[in-house]
Amino acid sequence: MVDLESGRHQSHRVAQALSISLSTITRIQRRLSSNDNVLRSPGKKRSRKKSKTTDLSDAVRHNLVVQQNYYS
């Protein structure tokens, strides 16, 4: 069984060590306990475009095909 008092005390010590508030610790714990294990960064993120083989030069594309055939 988990002792909540020791958990709060530990959270308080961590918050003091990191110079952050207890509410921040609580928010992090809530996010980690949910399925969303990734902490969101503030602000808007730019979407990352996936590179396509058509964007690559013929030499690089040929090299990738050769490597793919070699390792498969």
Image (cartoon, rainbow, N blue to C red):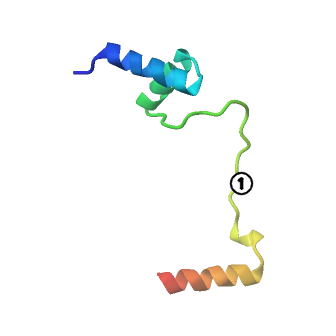
Q: Looking at the image, is 3 positioned above or below residue 29?
A: above
Residue that badge 1 annotates: 49
From the viewer's side, name the closer residue of 7 and 35.
7
Residue 14: percent from left, percent from top: 48, 25
Q: Residue at x 68, y 30 (%)?
A: 42
Question: Would you say residue 34 is visible in this rendering?
Answer: no
In-image side of 7 versus 19 (left or right): left
Taking depth in this image into account, of 7 and 65 the one nearest to the observer is 7
Q: Position of residue 44 (x, y in %)?
A: 73, 34
**Residue 70 image position (x, y, % from top left):** 52, 86
Residue 53, image x and y in percent? 69, 71
Q: Does the rendering let one see residue 15?
A: yes
> Number of labelled discs?
1
* Residue at left offset 57%, top offset 17%: 21
Q: Residue at x 40, y 16 (%)?
A: 9
Give amino acid for label 1: Lys
The relative height of residue 46 versus residue 20 in the rendered view (above or below) is below
Question: Where the N terminus falls, by quadrant?
Answer: top left
Element marked by disc 1? loop
Other-residue count near label 1 (Cα within 10 Å), few / some / many at <14 / 14–19 / ≥20:
few
User: Farthest left residue?
Assistant: 1
The residue at the point 76 percent across, 69 percent down is: 55
